[in-house]
Image: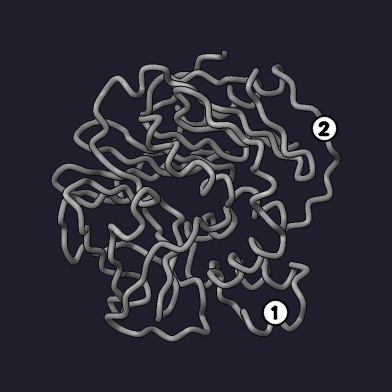
Amino acid sequence: MQELEIPYFGTVRLAIEKMYKIQDLNLYIVPTIESNSTSHEREYLVINEKPDSVRFRDSGSIDKVYADNLTGSYILLPVGIVIAGLTQPRIIRNTIVLEPYAKDVLVDVMCVSASTPITPRAYMKMHRYAPLSVKKACRFSQRRVWSTIRAVIASSDLSSHDKSRILDNLALFMKEIERTKQIGKFLEDVQIHEGQVGFAVFDHEGIIALELFNHADSFKTCSKDILKKYVLERVFTKHTERIYDLNEDLIGKALNMLIKDLEKAEYKLIKKSSEHVTYEISGTSFEGQYAILKGKTIYMVVWRR
């Protein structure tokens, strides 16, 4: 295993020998291991563990929704989650940790269906993790998010009937793609290893993303849901690059580039509460976010620009 010191996160080991290749999509999934991650108490839950533990409510504003934590635990809401209900669907723009029994917490969101009207006070719940291209667009503007979604739907091979039914609704599109393309089949053989806290995703250009939790139990609860977003992206972008074999030398070079970029990156505070903060990462080649709870980094995701 190759040991990595991730800035603002800590030390993890990259289990190259446990690497999994999704041949049809030219994706490599490399597990990250932290053997001692379960030696400390986990002070939070990820929303995937109890989707109904958070009640979202439309604020009437396109860029905000209210969230109520219905449990006595801290709840982590990672960036990129799509929430939907009988109102305009949204995507969570910034990672946030909800405090126990918190009420009416304003969550930063962006709209993922321009044609769907807002219904103030309508309830929503977690739907899926958005594809990476849409999450990237959230760093720019609402207009960029809408244009990205329209381009993705237009380029897909869904029938014209399905496209006319879906229009520009990302939530409906993801549900339809997952059903028709049988996304789950690509992940059937992916194994979650003891002590695994995340993974690095590679393609022919290098690292697509690195996603990490500070506890193996947190990663285990949402691993397949998170992996689906990378699979979805490859399915509907109709990649045509050659199939190749990723070796340890290429992995090492890609990781060195990532670490150097993170060391020089700008870190901007974007969310803060009494016990939680979220920082935005902006490097030359990578960007992302990380969340701190009670002084410890509990979640980090970085992706290639």
Q: In this view, does 280 lie above or below 238?
A: above
Q: In this view, does 79 lie above or below 8?
A: below
Q: Is residue 136 above or below residue 67?
A: above
The percent position of residue 201, horizontal first and vertical second, equals 61, 36
The percent position of residue 254, horizontal first and vertical second, equals 64, 27
The percent position of residue 67, horizontal first and vertical second, equals 26, 64
Q: Is residue 129 above or below residue 60?
A: above
Residue at the spot x=42%, y=66% of the render? 83
Q: 176 or 80, which lies in front?
A: 176
Crowding around mark 1 (Cα neighbors within 10 Å: few <14, some 14 to 19, many 20+) is some
Residue at mark 2: 244
Residue at the spot x=75%, y=26% of the render? 246
Crowding around mark 2 (Cα neighbors within 10 Å: few <14, some 14 to 19, many 20+) is few
Q: Quadrant of residue 31?
A: top right
- Left or right position of 181 against 271: right
Residue at the spot x=54%, y=42% of the render? 303
Q: Quadrant of the N terminus?
A: top right
- Residue type at mark 2 is Tyr
Residue at the spot x=25%, y=44% of the render? 277
The percent position of residue 198, horizontal first and vertical second, equals 49, 33
Q: How far, Cα to Cα, is label 1 from label 2?
A: 34 Å
Query: Which tag, 1 or 2, sits closer to the chain's start?
Result: 1
> Disc 2 on helix, strand or loop?
loop
- Residue type at mark 1 is Asp
Residue at mark 1: 162
